[in-house]
Image (tube, helix red, strand yellow):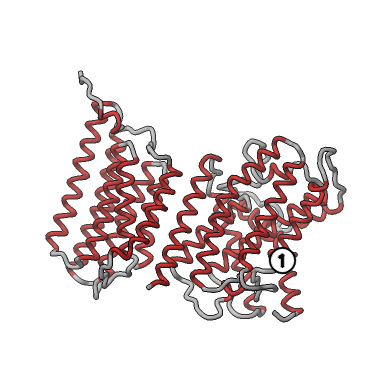
Amino acid sequence: MEWLITGIILTSFVVLGSSRLASSIRMVALQGGLLSILPVLSRPSFFDLHGLTLFIISFFIKTVAIPVFLFRSLKQAKIQKEVEPIVSLHLSLVGGGAILVMAFASLRAFPLPTAPFPPLIIPAALTTVLIGFFLLVSRTKAITQVIGFLILENGVFLFGMTIISDFPLTVEMGVLLDLLVGVFVMGIIIYHINKTFDHIDTQALSKLRDVE
Amino acid sequence: MEFDPVLWGLHLFLLLVAPPFFLGVIAKTKGWFVGRNGPPLLQLYYDLFKLFRKGAVYSKTTSSIFRMAPAAIFILLIFAGLFLPIGGAALLYFRGDIILFAYLLGFTRFLLILAAMDTGSSFEGMGASREVTFGALSELAFFLLLVVLVVTTGALSLNGIFQWESLHSTFKPVFLLLFFSFFLILLTENSRIPIDDPATHLELTMIHEVMILDTSGPDLGFILYGASIKLFLFMTFAVSLLWPQTGGWSWFSLGFFLLKILGVAVAIGVVESSNARLRLIKIPQLLIANFVVTIFALLVAIFGRAL
């Protein structure tokens, strides 16, 4: 399980440092996949209906449905330019390192029991959430903000796993469905922004202008 | 640290004779990837033999530093090699020799840069400046990596770190992180492809090669020989990170060790063939990412101990 958690942290760093939209989407998909495997391993037996259903659904949504949809809206919006960060990629990586140090240092403030998981999971969740926030504020494209949002959500998912290991199945499925719908709505919004303004730079959205 | 002639002989033999062969392996792998035969495996030996028979030409603007540097670099690298366990235990060790090891490598870089600046050529000055820029970042990561090793193993010498006398379960995430980070450091320090292309001779893009434009004859031989030894040291380090030698030496472990090095050499060849050289502006980003990964490894290591 430590391997998976390490992988989750590393994938969010790859997203932080990569300059290509396609590779960041793939990395988010990979992260979702790793994340969906994690709860299966925490259960006593592998063939546990609850765990297995959850694994299949979350794997489908996080690594198949959402990335496919993001790639589609990438194609629809005909995005030529790649990631355009406000903070340069070098600095975002350094910032990510600072977040990592902070997350590990604040470990004492979260003395949570992490019973089936290794204790590494708390700083990992914190790092993922904070990197998601960082991506949200430091990228200008709407689609990169969706990616930041997804990473943030993954972090929250990781946190949730440590606190309550046994959500009722319906609640978890509801959350996943919400996420899927959210991404759908964002994709549609991206498409419309692109159609109206010829770009999806959210910085330009703070100005008002007449639409002919 | 008693004197064991067999161990000394073996260690020095490996250190002095084996390295050029592995550069041949890398060249062969790259050749195979592009569908050619590639140069003979022993090409570097022939080159060295040829170079050492020649005379050197010195520019009038150079001073004694330029003449001294190649041989000094070579000797310093050999000296650094004595501290690294190759095959069996290291020949020399004491508490804290990791710092000496890192600084010996840093010193060779310093001498190379000085020699390059000494020629007064603007191209070589440019190469030196690049080497310093990237070296500063990769050395930072290398030092941090040594810190992680010290934290995880509790030993303060390379011998203690890589001989795993007491503990060790190699297959932990920390070591894999360290291995990847170190592999990148290896590529940077030895000017391999994603960072620098050893085969390029276009002045605007090369880093390491541009610094030795003015060296010739035996001096060039020393530099090339030294570069192969440095690569060998780094490959040994990388192999020991992932899969350390245990205990003393035997013919079996020796063969095994050489096979592992061969594997790393082939891996370097594959990486070089399947990647394009990065733009210069992208390199610091890669090295910073590497640094962050090492920080991550350090945090995991410290965290793992605290529990």
Pick out the residue farthest to the top. A212
Which chain does the numbered disc 1 sit on?
A: B
Q: Residue at x 26, y 30 (%)?
A: A194
Can residue B296 be seen at all in this image of the molecule?
Answer: yes
> x and y percent of residue B277 in the render?
56, 44
Can residue B47 be seen at all in this image of the molecule?
Answer: no
Q: Amino acid at mark 1?
A: Leu
> x and y percent of residue B50 in the render?
82, 52
Kindly state the secondary structure of the residue where label 1 is placed: helix
Q: Is residue B56 above or below residue B180?
A: above
Q: Quadrant of the C terminus of chain A?
A: top left
Q: Quadrant of the N terminus of chain A?
A: bottom left
Q: Residue at x 40, y 57 (%)?
A: A101
Q: Is residue A209 above or below residue B192?
A: above
User: On the image, numbered disc 1 is attached to which residue?
Assistant: B15
Count of labels shown?
1
> x and y percent of residue B203 in the render?
67, 37
Q: Residue at x 85, y 46 (%)?
A: B56
Closer to the camera in the image, B54 or A56: B54
Please rate how many residues cluster around mark 1, counting C-alpha atoms within 10 Å: few if below 14, some from 14 to 19, many from 20.
many
In this picture, residue B265 sits left or right of residue A168: right
Closer to the camera in the image, A99 or B35: A99
